[in-house]
Amino acid sequence: MSVLTDLIIRARALLFRSREETELEDEVRFHIDRDVHERVRRGEVPDKARREALIAFGGVERYKERVRDARGTRPLEELAADIRYALRGLRRNPGFTATGILVLGIGIGATATVYSIVHSVIVADLPYPQSDRLVRVVEQNSATSIWALSTADVTAIRERQRVFEAWGEIQRTEVAYSGSGTPQHIVIGRASAGYFRAIGIPVARGRAIEPADEAQGAPPVMVVTDAFARRTLGGPDAALGRSLSLDGVSHTVVGVLPEGRDELGGIRAVAFPVLQLRAPTRRGPFWLRGVGRLKPDVTLAAAERDLAEISDALLPLWSDFRDSTARLTPQPLRDVVVGSAVKQVGLFAGAVALVLLLAIVNVATLVLVRASAREQELAVRVMLGAKRSRIARLIVTENLILTLSAALLGLGLATWGLDLAVAQLPDMPRIQNASLDWRVIMLGIGAAVLSGLLVSLSPVAALSDEGGLAPHAASRRTGTGQRTSAMRAAFVIAEFALAWPLLVGAGLLLNSFVRLQRVDPGFDPAGLVAVGLSLPAARYAGVADVLRFRELAGQRVAAMPGVESVGLTTQIPPDQSGGNDNFNLVHRPVPDGEAEPNSPWYYVSASYFSTLGIRIIEGRSFTPADTADEFPVIAVSRSWAEHYLPGESAVGRQLVQGGCYNCPRTTIVGVVEDIRNLGPSLPMDAVYGPMSQYGGRSMQVVARLRSMTPNVTARLRDELRALDPELPLDEFVLTEQLQASLADPMRWAAVLSAFAACAMGLAALGVFGLMAYAVRQRRREIGVRLALGAQSGVVTRLVVWRGMRYAAIGSAIGLGVTLLLANRLRTMLFDVSPTDVATFVGVGVLLLGSAFLASWIPGRRAARIRPIEAISSE
Amino acid sequence: MNRESIDLLQGTLDVLILKTLAWQPMHGYAVTRWVRERTQGSIEIEDAPLYKALHRLERAGCVSAEWGLSENNRRARYYRLTATGRRRLKAEESEWRRYAAAVLRVLEPA
């Protein structure tokens, strides 16, 4: 064969494409005209003759395409043609298109939202230079027992450490600030000069805290956030040099943080005043957060060794702390900041991934249904000469367009969803930084392309089945029908398997939420209101001032109309942020070198017990005689007594409090009934000391009212403000507090329930679609059965039984998967086992029930088929 | 399509076309008609494969094509056997004869 002719023809094809094309058309037209001519001569009607001629020619298009192929210039335009065709196809089927885009869009949107959060909360680096070198140092004596540092600890670290290039401390606290308006509480972080150096964020204006500022008696200075400066100080420039009163102490603003920065080392605060430490007089208390920046070549392990040496050196210095197992331990700051969010976000991410998968499976099913509905059309196209590969490409194009549109919608939804999530989960660390960055957008598009391909797989697979799309009626009913049905059955099974973990997770969380809600708080919250306040040290310097304020506050509130009784406490339930203290029983001390037990510790007035309705089980309540001059006394909760003094009377026992072995011993004078101080799911150990022996300046004034009136808290507030107009006051209604303590479990249960509802709906839809399709496919067969006398009930049962079989297989798989996964929920559950039988049975009933309903409807329809119509319609 | 027509065996089409064109240059439609008449309608060449084959043969240099006027003065593309085509026909023809004879020998009762 001559290569030359071949080349010339190819070249001509390239150069004179249109001419070639016309010649081709001319040739075909000539052929058909001749045929028509011939047919008319034989006596056919011209119109019919032309039609017959065209049919006889078979694939005009196929012929042209093959010749084009032969010319070797397969043009890119085919892609454009594919897209045009796909768009036309999608427009023709608005219901399918809308459903597909919506289902996938929601799936992709949810995924993009959650992964933005995951990225921001868990994956992203901390926003500090070389943040991987930042470590937090804690005291630790077991895997779970971790606490903060004391002044003695940080003094020793400052003096002895050799691994950090910078080291500093911070304490997060709330202080009273009265700027222009009403006095309020603001969150501050008291930080040392070293803390600023360690974190490594330079101030935008002015200067950071310097070591000289830390000296006792140095004028207090502070660095404020840009936002705070703009809000209250007239802008970052005007802020410098201004003096502000924090808890009655005047602080001068020396620096302003860069715009947008509202935290340092994970401590979110509006201002960072200087931390001035006094020389330690004992090892405790432990109240500081220490952060160090490792020297460039120092590993975490090296830091651990260095700090262990310091721990050993510290132990003999102080007699009040004798736990030799306690170690100064470094933790990567990132782990500390991300903390417990990993688990919650992980749950979220897992759930959303399942929903996305379900959405993909569902759209795949939709596409498959559509492909079956289009079988005839595709068969005709094949007959007219379109190649299978070309049709496959068409299907892929169509699905990619569908899924990319869904991705667009999904990313739109994600921006909205992200705002919602940030607003709904304000306590999640670092969530504020969550944004749709390019990675998430790539993820969304990647998910779209991937799901587009996945979704195309099924019809393309059906297509490549040799003869599957042949235009014979018989093979349409058996070949492809069976093939796609098997695939769709697999999809339905997958849907049920995927729905299981979501439904069980939601069921367990709901179950646990209901149980939490039923927990008896131990007191009647109805009619209880509280006002929290903190007396500034500057104006209430002595204990006497504090005691006088308490006395007056109690009297004024008790005199209010409608108030039944008043009590004072350091903490209103439920609250986990309250004080703790360690203790050692005198008659049964812990062995030397072991950690002393630790318990929640509250200071309350004698009337607190009666105000809340806490019964005295044994011994006595506090009396006015329990003054600071007398020996310290405490009352303990029933749980505490059973925990630490099982089988003996607690009253009269003595203990060493807070490791103070030089102080007088503390005597237990009473045992009181348990209440849920920390929250419904936590232990009820509690120690109560009398307010009269406590000099602390923070307190809650709790009042029991005869009836709740709308503005009673306002009146209560006014009453206290009359005592001191500059006090910031926080009001609480205890029923609301109890509700708020359930907000988190409720939120998680709600989120997972929403996902689970989606999953169940999708699964039911899947089985419904499959069975409806099967009934349509087997119309004729069912018609014959009915004609031969089959009972309509039998036909229905047949359909339902098949649908149920898929649901059952899917459920079996889902059950197995769920049992494997359920344990991960354990820490989020209260009083419910992760393998709670009732929940699993309930989910099974729910899913199989929905499957039953979903296949019963097509089953009924099948039974109503009219045999004659069904048989004659083919 | 004619029910009684014989399905074309694989590889038969080229040799039929070459043989037909060996009589005289023809356009595609004439090739179909000629084969149909010669076989009394037993072999019906499908149109699309015919043109595909013609173009393939043209590329292989077995036939050459040019536009001419048909019997009733229409522009038509005439295919003419080239020397290469003639050689190819000879080779394929003898191949086919040997093949057919062999098949017949098997089919004939012994």
Image (tube, coloured by chain):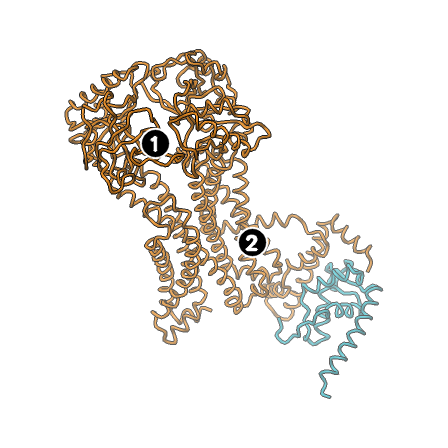
Chain colours: A orange, B cyan
Q: Residue at x 36, y 67 (%)?
A: A796
Label 1 lies in what chain? A
User: Which mark is drawn over residue A582?
Assistant: 1
**Which residue is nearer to you in this view: A829 or A806?**
A829
**Which residue is nearer to you in this view: A41 or B89?**
B89
Instruction: Give left or right: position of A57 versus A199.
Output: right
Q: Residue at x 55, y 26 (%)?
A: A162
Task: Measuring from the top left, give residue A838's x and y in whole percent.
Answer: 32, 54
Q: Do we see residue A490 in this rendering?
A: yes
Label 2 lies in what chain? A
Q: Is residue A275 above or below residue A107?
A: above
Cβ–Cβ under 8 Å for marks 2 and 1: no
Q: Secondary structure at mark 1?
A: strand
Instruction: Give left or right: position of A230 versus B2.
Output: left
Instruction: Give left or right: position of A859 versus B9.
Output: left
Task: Measuring from the top left, give residue A287's x and y in whole percent.
Answer: 39, 26
**Which residue is nearer to you in this view: A230 or A791?**
A230
Q: Secondary structure at mark 2?
A: helix
User: Which mark is drawn over residue A395?
Assistant: 2
Q: Residues within 10 Å of mark 2 (few under 14, many from 20)?
A: many
Which quadrant: the N terminus of chain A? bottom right
Camera-nearest label, 2 or 1:
1
Q: Do we see residue A242 in this rendering?
A: no
Q: What amino acid is at disc 1?
A: Asn
Q: What amino acid is at disc 2?
A: Ile
- Earlier in the chain: of badge 2 and badge 1, it is 2
Marks 2 & 1 on one chain: yes
Question: Residue lying farthest bottom?
Answer: B110
